[in-house]
Image (spheres, grey):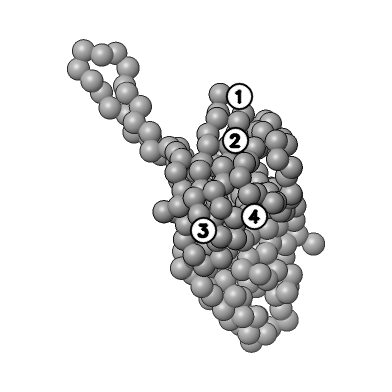
């Protein structure tokens, strides 16, 4: 049976049958074009981001009578519209190796569909990238060891350095080479590149860091080197693709 999961629950719990899944085009790259007098060709002005993408499931719910159907549909709406102000993990049986982050978008128009015995469409507004489930697993990396990004897009990982004192992190991959220095670390530091924060536990450590931007893992091999009192290096790579 085809299914999707959202906000920690599966469509199978409600007896929803999926007829089809639609991903409406690739996400649009956020860029504009500016014309300059006397110059042929427009100048590309890039915001260096992709827009959200719509993912829609056409589902079917069969019950013996309208009353039974209405009871289940109320439960479905309660599930889908819980916490509609934040993104939730979405997985399905069509693409079992990946998940998306999305939120319910638009109305379901269920009541108008009773004559079709509960056929309706569920649409989610999703972040443009989907994430490899394998890349969401935390791994331990040796100092000077490599980590291989199998996807075509640069990943924004979570890197945890356990240690105290003054620490240094360097990432090198082809033409990419960046270093971050951490001063006065008491237990460790977490570098979350997607959230654009350095912290440990509930304490922000942005004021203890020098370096350009946040760590990234380009496609292919990246060598990770640390110095100072680092006792352990852990990474959640967040491999991603469109």
Q: Position of residue 57 (x, y in %)?
A: 62, 58
Which residue is the extreme one toward the right?
Answer: 1
Does 53 appear above or below 77? above
The secondary element bearing badge 3 is classed as: strand
Q: Which residue is mark 3?
A: 199
Whichever of callouts 4 and 1 sits on the residue coming sooner in the sequence is 4
Q: Which residue is mark 4?
A: 162
Whichever of callouts 3 and 2 sits on the residue coming sooner in the sequence is 2
Q: Quadrant of the N terminus?
A: bottom right
The secondary element bearing badge 2 is classed as: strand
- Decide if residue 212 is in sight here: yes
Q: Which residue is mark 2?
A: 171
Whichever of callouts 2 and 4 sits on the residue coming sooner in the sequence is 4
The number of numbered badges drawn on the structure is: 4
Q: Position of residue 5 (x, y in %)?
A: 67, 64
The answer for how far apart the CA atoms under marks 2 and 1 are is 10 Å
């Amino acid at each position: 049976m085809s299914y999707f999961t959202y906000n920690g629950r599966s469509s199978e719990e409600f007896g929803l049958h999926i007829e089809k899944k639609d991903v409406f085009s690739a996400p649009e790259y956020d860029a504009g074009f500016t014309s300059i007098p006397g110059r042929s060709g427009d100048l590309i002005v890039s915001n260096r981001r992709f827009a959200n993408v719509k993912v829609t499931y056409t589902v079917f719910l069969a019950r013996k009578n309208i009353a039974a159907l209405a009871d289940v549909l109320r439960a479905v709406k309660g599930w889908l519209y819980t916490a509609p102000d934040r993104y939730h993990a979405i997985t399905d049986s069509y693409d079992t190796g990946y998940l998306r982050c999305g939120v319910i978008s638009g109305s379901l128009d269920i009541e108008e569909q009773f004559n079709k015995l509960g056929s309706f469409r569920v649409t989610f507004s999703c972040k443009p990238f989907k994430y490899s489930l394998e890349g969401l697993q935390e791994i331990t990396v040796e100092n000077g060891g490599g980590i291989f990004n199998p996807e075509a897009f640069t990943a924004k990982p979570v890197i945890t350095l356990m240690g105290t004192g003054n620490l240094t992190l360097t990432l090198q991959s082809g033409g990419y080479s960046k270093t971050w220095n951490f001063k006065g670390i008491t237990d460790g530091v977490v570098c979350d590149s997607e959230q654009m924060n350095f912290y440990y536990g509930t304490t922000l450590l942005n004021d203890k860091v020098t370096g350009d931007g946040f760590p990234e893992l380009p496609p292919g091999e990246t060598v990770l080197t640390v110095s100072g009192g680092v006792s352990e290096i852990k990474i959640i790579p967040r491999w991603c693709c469109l």
